[in-house]
Image (tube, grey):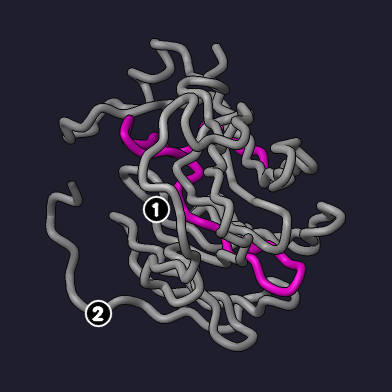
Amino acid sequence: MKRNSLPCSVILILLSANALPADWNQWRGPSGAGISQAKSLPTQWSEKKNIAWKTPLPGRGWSSPVIEGERIWVTAADETLATEEASKKRLKGNTGSQPLIVLEKARFHAICIDMDSGKILHNVELFSVREPQWVHRFNSYASPTPIIEKGRVYCHFGTYGTACVDSASGKVLWRNLDMHCMHENGPGGSPVIAGDIIFFHMDGSDQQYVAALNKKDGKLAWRTGRSGKLHSNPQ
């Protein structure tokens, strides 16, 4: 049973006569403060009010959009639910009380949308994973927000991998599938860039560390373990 449209992801673009498009390159924008310099933005909207277009997107994801020029990028996961029998078997021994989603398969995508028309320009499958870790029902498999910089989109999905995509052609430039942890409730930490390095934290119930990848080729630059001791109950 597939879970590729529950809920259906949409992009909403707000009309503003005086607001010019500006790059929004990462989680919470260029400064990381969630503040835009745009003026005269609408403060109210609905299904019909202040909407330029609305586009249904395949898959499911909580990642924020990033913008470069006239192109918007988001990430999503196309989910195939596990059977009830398989879910019970894989959750056996789990002592948490959280509502969890168990999948048979997940396919991870980067999606590019044209800002003017809402047309999907690229839908790039980055990874495909069988029997991924369970995820909290209020989370998704595509929650970390990507980063876009100088024609490259860096997409991070926690333990499932990190990839770099050419933002013009949609070509995958590199993948790194070597950084792993047990998320318990699913991935959520968005990456950041400093110089030639893209880095992110991997705080799982089995191991906790910060990893840095070379943004040119995706190879590991360094990895530093967290200090301290995890609580006996990771939930």
Looking at marks 2 and 1 on the same chain, the residue that comes earlier in the sequence is marked by: 1
Judged left or right of residue 225, residue 123 is right
Q: Amino acid at mark 1?
A: Gly
Q: Residue drawn at (75%, 36%), measured in percent from left and top?
A: 119
* In the image, residue 33 above or below residue 78: below
In percent of width and height, residue 80 lies at: 56, 22
The number of callouts visible is 2
| Residue 166 visible somewhere in the drawing | yes
In percent of width and height, residue 58 lies at: 63, 28
Q: Residue drawn at (31%, 45%), measured in percent from left and top?
A: 184
Q: Which residues are magenta?
A: 127-154
Element type where label 2 sits in the image: loop
Q: Which mark is residue 227?
A: 2
**Gap in angstroms between the C-alphas marked 2 and 1:** 21 Å
- Residue under circle 1? 188
Displayed quadrant of residue 71: bottom right
Give whichever of 53, 196 is nearer the camera.
Answer: 53
Give whichever of 146, 172 is nearer the camera.
Answer: 146
